[in-house]
Image: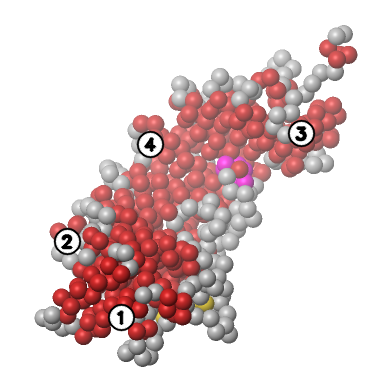
Amino acid sequence: SQSVLIKADRSMPTMSSTSAIDNDAENALFAIFSTLSKRGPSSPAVTDAAASIQSLEEKLEGPSGIIHFLLLRLWLPPTENESQKDAVRGDSALSVLVHLVESRPSKYMSLTASAVRKSIEHEFTSAVAIDSNDDATNKHVSDALLMALAKLLIGPNSGSQVGIATDASASLLALCRWDRHQNNHCGSIAKRVLCTIDTLWYHLLEQGEQKRRESSCSQMRIAALMIDISLLGGKEMSLALLGDDKNDKGNSNGQSIMDKLLYIALDHPNDDPLLQVSALDQLERLAVYDNSEYPISSQRADFLLANDILRRGLLCLVGSPCDLTNDANTNEEWDEPDPINGGAALRLLTEICRVGVASSVSINEATRDKFQLLLCSFQKALHNFQPHGELERLSYIYAVSALFASCAMVASSAADVANTVLNDKTLLYEWLSLHIRVSQPKLKATVLSSLSQVIEPSIWKDDNQTARPSDSIALQLYQAFGHANNEGDATELILASAKSPFVEERLGAYSMLRAVVGRGVGVRLLLLYDDGSGNGFLSWLLNQDLESTVDGKKAKYEIVNSMLSQNEGLLGGLLPARALRQLEEWRSKGPNFVNTVPWEMATE
């Protein structure tokens, strides 16, 4: 059995500190361990152990006292002399604890799960360092302990007592998180945990159909823990993708633990759509790109952007005639999306596209090529998708914008794919038209906000991994906005929304203006606009009376800040000196700045 030896916390009680505990309790514990280690299938040892347990409960004030008593020994390495009372440590202490949980679940299971979680979260933190030369007592994390915790995820009481499974999952994740921060142990606990829960998942899938259905919650708990571990970093993600032929197991035909989740999520048609949508939700967690502690690793980006099974399965759910082993032919006719999980698949494809945008600088050429295949098929999927209701329309708008953002990113290396999408007038109209949403300010705000994020990705993802579309593509999309709205002037349409009585629509327009003023070509375009009465973008921007809400003032300030910070050296030749001074004063004093009129001028 593998184990990890870990430097103990200075405050952790040693074996010498337990000498103060009643010697009778020590004797009772050793008696329980000795009895359990000798028992056979029909041995009276269980009765003898029960008597010793009752005696120990009396001495240690009930189950909580026994659990604490055993936890002091749980992290200690095993001793060679099993005849001594201090032999009840490590896996020996664990065997007693497991017996208590299995023989008295109502009294011990919940208390034990909670106590072990608190102990692990206290003892195993990233602040604890390893010093191999330190003679302090070591903590011992055995495979038996990992298996005992993992079994709580799928135990008979895990459905009715969710807290037990939650504590067990949190304990295993805390161990993996701690291990990730250790230089000479990185990934070892994660690998063992993944192997353990992979084995349990395999046995759940080997059951009959009825038993498999009954174990659906247990399967998703395992999947959730696997995703949690995968989010920790690139090494952990790679471990989740390793097949059994690579980790010395041979019970799943070479499938990795991630493969098990993929086939549940992407099997089509599926006789358990509720389990399928839960699996899709777990996969969507991999596409989270705004976690500052655990950003998207290259391994996770490669999996999302280039995995053939993931791509084909999601496209199949949104109507593609492909299957998990073969892509669809170019001229094959698409079917209707899956009536239950087609929307979830579309949402995940959208998030994958956003991962492509967020990782556009770092992905390799092979991943980029596979991603282009996804974009071509995603374009067809959006033509095939007919949204109904406001929520589906919101998802559709974000999906189309994610497709265009991705194509803007790959335009330099995949001109054909990018041009095909960027000149798709049907999708542009469905995405950018405000007239078909004239009485829906929330949808209009979504349109404006989504377009702003395509033109200026730093609005939603501000880091050095995200490339910026070229000025020509940004200008092309800006003009397309006007074409999609009765061939109108894009600046006039945006300023009209900026003066809307609905705050949602105004905020969408402000976001769009912030994206445009971040480019020199955009600033020139806005300053050239005149509504025919001598008023234009600059007069609107400097009129602070037009916005009264806190969010609106902040958003308008961001326009000023972006325009000044992105166009230094350019604005001096475009703006009057007085207007430029006012804007610079606004930027220095913050969103609540108000341009006051001097008293002399006010009384003239």
Which badge, 1 or 2, is on the more N-terminal residue?
A: 1
Q: Position of residue 323 (x, y in %)?
A: 30, 58
Question: Which residue lies under the disc numbered 3?
Answer: 589
Residue picked out by circle 4: 392
Indicate left or right for 313 with 459 as reference. left
Magenta region, residue range: 453-458
Answer yes or no: do the residues labelled 1 and 4 have beta carbons within 8 Å? no
In the drawing, does residue 38 fall left or right of residue 497? left
**What's the amino acid at mark 4?**
Glu
Q: Which mark is residue 27?
A: 1
Query: Residue at position x 63%, y 22% from top?
Result: 548
Q: Nearer the viewer, mark 1 or mark 3?
A: 1
Considering depth in this image, is 156 or 522 the residue closer to the camera?
156
Q: Can residue 14 be seen by looking at this rendering?
A: yes
Question: Which quadrant does the N terminus fall into?
Answer: bottom left
Binning the other alpha carbons within 10 Å of mark 3 as few (below 14), some (14 to 19) or many (20 upward) gives few
* Mark pair 2, 4: CA separation: 35 Å
What is the distance, in whole Å, between disc 2 and disc 3 at their CAs? Answer: 65 Å
